[in-house]
Image (cartoon, rainbow, N blue to C red):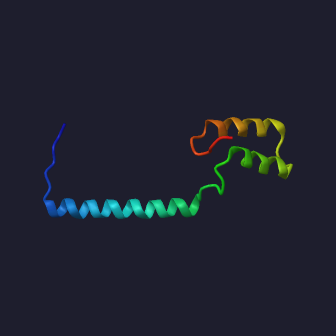
Amino acid sequence: MSTITISKTEYIFLKERADAYERVLSVAQNALYPPPPTKSRSEVLKGFRASKKYNTAFLKSLKKGLGDSEYFNEP
């Protein structure tokens, strides 16, 4: 593996730029893809069922997907 040596000032500059990039990326992701308003799997399913726009196969697949997700709580 190769080793590259840079000055401390250059390292600090690059580190600050990387941190700024991470902050901008985080804000942009939250603006474009906000988290769902609820973490309840049953509330999400209830909302989809209530719309009457989705067939049983889709709702079954959604239930499985929500069950696999680490974001949503039980039930």
Image quadrant in which you'd find residue 20: bottom left
Q: Relative to 31, is 26 on the left or the right?
A: left
Residue 49 spot, x, y in % from top left: 82, 46
Compared to residue 22, the image places residue 61 above or below, namely: above
- The N terminus lies in quadrant: top left
Residue ranking furthest to the right:
52
Residue drawn 21% across the image and 62% down it: 12
Residue drawn 65% across the image and 57% down it: 37
* Foreground of the two, 2 or 30: 30
Compared to residue 38, the image places residue 13 above or below, namely: below
Residue 55 spot, x, y in % from top left: 84, 41
Residue drawn 78% across the image and 40% down it: 59
Compared to residue 50, the image places residue 30 above or below, namely: below
Q: Relative to 29, is 67 on the left or the right?
A: right
Residue 13 spot, x, y in % from top left: 23, 64
- The C terminus lies in quadrant: top right
Residue 5 spot, x, y in % from top left: 13, 51
Q: Relative to 7, is 42 on the left or the right?
A: right
Residue drawn 76% across the image and 35% down it: 60
Tell how many labels: 0
Residue ranking furthest to the front:
75
Q: Relative to 48, is 11 on the left or the right?
A: left
